[in-house]
Image (spheres, rainbow, N blue to C red):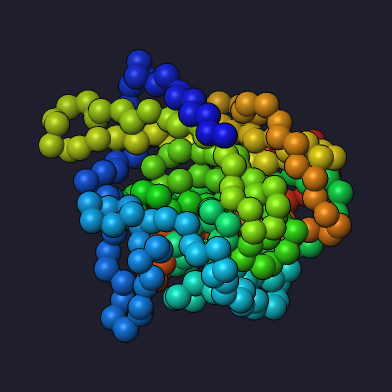
Amino acid sequence: MRIALFAALAALSVSPGFVSFSWAQSLVPPPAPPGIDVPDWALPQSANHKQVAPPADFHRASITTNGAIGQFDAQSDIGGPLAPGSASYDAASKTYTINSAGYNIWYQRDEFHYLWKEMIGDVSLAASVVWPNIDDFHDRKVALVIRDSLEDDSRQIMAAQHGNGMVHISWRAEKTGQMTDVEYRSARQPRTGTAEKGPQTFHPVRIGIEKKGDMFQLWISWQGEAFHPEGAPVSFKTKGPFYVGVGFTSHLPANVLTAKVADVVVENAAGKIR
């Protein structure tokens, strides 16, 4: 199921919530680093290539680095991306910097860098996403993820924000199954003034996901308004202890990009979204 909802923003003037975005540049991904063989199915969408689902039997082992980072217990390269990821935490600014390659968090398996902790029960998870370079590839995404395991094909549910401002809640109901999503797209706004400055993209200020029993609710602040539920909750049953955390994928199988994730809330209770 795929539902696209478009925020009616055309009447709004340019504000600090709008950021410059080079759409034409973003459609052409950079080449893979020398010496790295990228399978055809993992090539992202561009004028010449189309990313498709991996072969049904394709897997790579995840690689975990033990040791706490900020609020999280450890970090993992889920699905063994072709270029290793990394992360750091600045306590003063309450900001995580996550570097990751990885062709996607989608289809029947994932490749992304993941900061996580094991939990049971209800969860409130929220964060603000900052793109250090807004001209990087538009399909990269930061995801707030709750998953059964660290295997590349784990059952999971997540709220994600793409580089072009689109937000979705999505889930893999069964191990090795395909993802289902509900999308919320914010409309691109033309920049006022000279046309040569290019298009403008509206980016959400904050996203979150709340687990209350078997119901999961997406939360959004689109332009600095009060953080609020968006859409109907999704039913998804977790199985035993699960992993809760923040992930990032560049959507490029061998190219490492960077995202900054600030003011993370990760609480072992519902009703703590903020």
In depth, the one of 249 and 14 nearer the eye is 249
Which residue is situated farthest in the top direction here? 11
Image-quadrant location for residue 255: bottom left
In depth, the one of 243 and 115 nearer the eye is 243
Give the residue displayed 27% in from the left and 68% down from the top: 31
> Would you place residue 38 above or below residue 217 in this image?
below
Percent x, y for residue 66? 69, 78
In depth, the one of 219 and 90 nearer the eye is 219
Give the residue displayed 20% in from the left and 37% down from the top: 198
Give left or right: position of 255 versus 4: left
Q: Where is the N terminus found, in terms of image quarters?
A: top right
> Would you place residue 147 above or below residue 271 in this image?
below
* Residue 80 shows in the view: yes
Give the residue displayed 47% in from the left and 57% down from the top: 53
* Residue 224 shows in the view: no
Image-quadrant location for residue 82: bottom left
Q: Where is the C terminus found, in terms of image quarters?
A: top right
> Would you place residue 128 above or below residue 34 in this image?
above
Give the residue displayed 73% in from the left and 64% down from the top: 149
How many numbered circles does the render carry?
Answer: 0
Which residue is situated farthest in the bottom direction here? 35
Give left or right: position of 241 versus 244: right
Give left or right: position of 159 versus 48: right
Percent x, y for residue 144? 62, 50
Percent x, y for residue 223? 48, 29
Give left or right: position of 217 versus 134: right
Percent x, y for residue 2? 53, 33
> Would you place residue 149 above or below residue 182 in this image?
below
